[in-house]
């Protein structure tokens, strides 16, 4: 039977091979898998892929497109949700595929109405080629090519598998498209909802903009009126509880502004309910502010009485920084403002008097050169003063009573405008002239007066000019008295004419400085100081004149007092009388005159310096005339006078000023006159 099947399979034509194929593999080799590699199916335009599809979309193998017609797309949702039904005039795709593929090999045919398979019948003879059965089986049979029906069956199976994979891919694509359509439908619905919300927001925005414009217009018209009749809680809290700072000052200004508005509307007889309600509140706030300002200012005034306190720090950081406090107090409670102002004046009066009292005591410790009767032009030189053993005081230092030297630096030095401190004055061991303590005390006084006048002017800005001047004068009255007493103690009993004139020039300098600073309150102090200095200057000049008058004339045959003053002495009395060298008094007079002229370079015509110098010069010329009589004959007398006048002219030749020119011209005329004799 087995041999019969082999023979039949070899001899049966291709038309009957389909019925003779046994239910087994058609080839002894393993069945090959499909060469259709899994591919990534991409849905063009959607970015979606069917990852599980194993067959590429080779549409060229499908000759029928009847089953691929897409169903109609419904308006609501995807069409995949409904069953796909082909049109009635189109054949069933399954039947079309069976007609194309034919009946598959290996399947048992089913009889009509019977479940048993019908076996294939092999009818034909096998050609053994004259070989026995054993030889036929054992021979090497060359491989026979597969029958044509077998190749057709393999191709049919492959095509069917390909179409099956394609069908699965289409189903997956339909599922993906269904999901995409669902997503897009939902997105469209949401987009419509968002669009509706945007339109609603736009409508609301337009409405809100219109309301905002209306509110701004109303606020622009009603804002100032409402502000006039309202007061912020911050302002009330700042005045009632806040610290005394810039916010407190702003709150005070706001309260005063509201008060002025209420007063103005009351004058116009405008009865506004809000103003009537706010008026008691403003009064209470003013009363609270006055109370707090009083306590604050009184506390600062008490701080000025603390030991070692710097008043300028409190003045700059407290009084001047919050100067509007006193102005508010003066406008709303004048009586209390006047009392507080008087308390400040009394405190500063004590402050300056106590500090300048200590400063004066420190200056009194300075060692001052003493000028007595021996320091006059016509007096004999003072004998050498020695420190006697056991004496309480050491001998005073030596000084030049008639030469100005560097004493004028106290006026010419513009850089040194500060006063010496108290501890430096107490530690100083150097001897000074009387203008040193005078200058330092008055320099400190002028600086403090200027500073205090500036503070009073800003602090009591509501007061008049006379009230401010009166307050400053009241503060410095004890200090001014102290300065006058110091001046009296310095110039009283001294014969230092150059020192007194130096004090006069310093006092004039202080007067000019006060005028430049626009501080007129110290004018009375300056004027009284001049009253103390000028008379003393004239008294010392008169003392010099009297000393020249008292110089005795040289007696014949004796040296005398005048001969003792001679700059060049001879070995005998005749040589002394015959000497024509300049006299020692001439040297003194020339240096003294030069000092006065240097200090009077910018002197005015109303000063008594010119008259005093004229008297002193007359007495000097009279004395020289008496001295010339002891020189010998007329030619020697003329030569003696010429030498003395020439020495004076040489000494004063470098001085400048109107008064110096007059004196230079006068002595030049005397020299020419003596030379002409």
Image: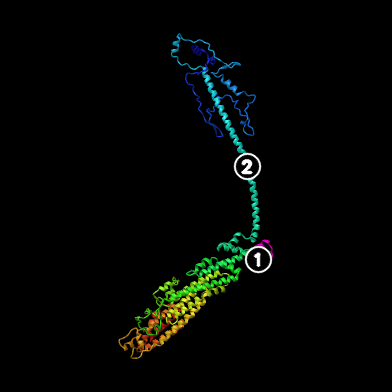
State yes or no: residue 273 in magenta: yes
**Quadrant housing the C terminus:** bottom left
The residue at which mark 2 appears reads as: 195
Q: Do the residues bearing badges 1 and 2 touch, measured as CB atoms within 8 Å?
A: no
Q: Tell me if residue 98 comes above or below residue 237 in the rendering.
A: above
Reading the image, the residue beneath label 1 is: 263
Looking at this view, is 445 or 621 the one in front? 445
Q: Position of residue 254 (x, y in %)?
A: 60, 63
Q: Nearer the viewer, mark 1 or mark 2?
A: 1
Indicate whether 22 appears above or below 264. Answer: above
Does the image show residue 518?
no
User: At x 48% / y 70%, what residue is drawn?
Assistant: 307
For the magenta stretch, what is the residue range? Answer: 265-278
- Circle 2: is it few (<14), some (14-19), or many (20+) Cα within 10 Å? few
Left or right placement of residue 595 versus residue 452 in this view: left
Residue 299 position within the rendered picture, expressed as x and y whole percent measured from the top left:
54, 68
The reply to whether residue 29 is visible in this rendering is yes
Rendering coords of residue 24 (x, y %): 51, 18
* The residue positioned farthest toward the left in the image shown: 571
For the point 59% across and 23% down, the residue is: 94
Residue 550 highlighted magenta (yes or no): no
In what element is the residue under mark 1? Answer: helix
């Amino acid at each position: 039977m087995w041999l019969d099947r082999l023979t039949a399979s070899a001899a049966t034509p291709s038309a009957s091979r389909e019925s003779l194929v046994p239910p087994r593999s058609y080839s002894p080799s393993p069945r090959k898998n499909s060469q259709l590699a899994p591919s990534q199916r991409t849905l063009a335009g959607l970015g979606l892929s069917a990852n599980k599809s194993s067959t590429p979309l080779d549409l060229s193998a499908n000759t029928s497109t009847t089953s691929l017609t897409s169903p109609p797309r419904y308006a609501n949702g995807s069409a995949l949700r409904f069953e796909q039904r082909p049109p009635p005039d189109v054949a069933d795709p399954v039947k079309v595929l069976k007609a194309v593929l034919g009946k598959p090999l290996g399947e048992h045919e089913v009889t009509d109405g019977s479940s048993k398979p019908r076996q294939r019948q092999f009818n034909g003879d096998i050609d053994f080629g004259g070989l026995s059965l054993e030889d036929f089986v054992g021979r090497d049979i060359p491989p026979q090519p597969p029958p044509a029906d077998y190749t057709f069956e393999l191709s049919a199976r492959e095509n069917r598998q390909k179409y099956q994979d394609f069908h699965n891919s289409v189903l997956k694509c339909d599922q993906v498209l269904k999901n995409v359509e669902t997503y897009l439908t939902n997105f469209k619905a949401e987009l419509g909802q968002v669009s509706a919300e945007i339109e609603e927001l736009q409508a609301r925005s337009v409405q809100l903009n219109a309301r905002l414009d209306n509110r701004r217009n109303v606020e622009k018209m009603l804002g100032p009126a409402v502000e006039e009749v309202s007061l912020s809680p911050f302002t009330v809290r700042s005045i009632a509880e806040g610290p005394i700072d810039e916010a407190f000052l702003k709150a005070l200004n706001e309260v005063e502004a509201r008060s002025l508005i209420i007063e103005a509307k009351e004058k116009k007889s405008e009865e506004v309910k809000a103003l009537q309600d706010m008026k008691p509140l403003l009064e209470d706030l003013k009363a609270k502010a006055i109370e707090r300002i009083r306590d604050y200012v009184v506390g600062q005034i008490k701080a000025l009485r603390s030991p070692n306190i710097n008043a300028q720090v409190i003045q700059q950081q407290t009084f001047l920084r919050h100067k509007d406090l006193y102005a508010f107090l003066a406008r709303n409670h004048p009586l209390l403002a006047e009392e507080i102002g008087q308390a400040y004046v009394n405190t500063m009066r004590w402050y300056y008097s106590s500090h300048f009292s200590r400063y004066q005591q420190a200056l009194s410790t300075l060692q001052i050169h003493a000028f007595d009767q021996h320091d006059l032009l016509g007096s004999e030189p003072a004998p050498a003063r020695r420190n006697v053993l056991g004496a309480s005081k050491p001998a005073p230092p030596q000084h030049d009573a008639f030469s100005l030297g560097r004493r004028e630096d106290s006026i010419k030095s513009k850089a040194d405008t500060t006063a010496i401190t108290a501890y430096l004055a107490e530690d100083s061991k150097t001897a000074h002239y009387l203008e040193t303590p005078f200058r330092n005390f008055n320099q400190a006084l002028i600086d403090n007066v200027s500073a205090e006048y500036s503070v009073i002017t800003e602090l009591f800005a509501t007061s008049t000019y006379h009230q401010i001047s009166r307050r400053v004068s009241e503060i410095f009255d004890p200090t001014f008295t102290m300065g006058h007493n110091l001046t009296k103690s310095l110039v009283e009993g001294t014969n230092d004419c150059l020192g007194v004139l130096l004090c006069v020039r310093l006092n004039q300098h202080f007067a000019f400085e006060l005028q430049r600073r626009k501080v007129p309150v110290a004018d009375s102090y300056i004027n009284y100081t001049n009253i103390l200095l000028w008379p003393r200057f004239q008294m010392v000049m008169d003392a010099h004149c009297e000393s020249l008058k008292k110089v005795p004339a040289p007696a014949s045959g004796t040296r005398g007092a005048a001969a003792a003053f001679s700059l060049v002495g001879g070995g005998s009395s005749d040589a002394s009388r015959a000497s024509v060298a300049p006299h020692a008094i001439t040297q003194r007079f020339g240096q003294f005159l030069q000092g006065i002229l240097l200090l009077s370079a910018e002197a005015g015509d109303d000063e008594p310096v010119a008259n005093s110098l004229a008297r002193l010069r007359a007495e000097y010329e009279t004395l020289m005339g008496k001295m010339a009589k002891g020189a010998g004959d007329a030619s020697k007398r003329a030569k003696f006078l010429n030498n003395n006048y020439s020495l004076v002219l040489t000494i004063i030749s470098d001085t400048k000023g109107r008064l110096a020119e007059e004196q230079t011209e006068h002595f030049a005329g005397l020299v020419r006159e003596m030379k002409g004799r």
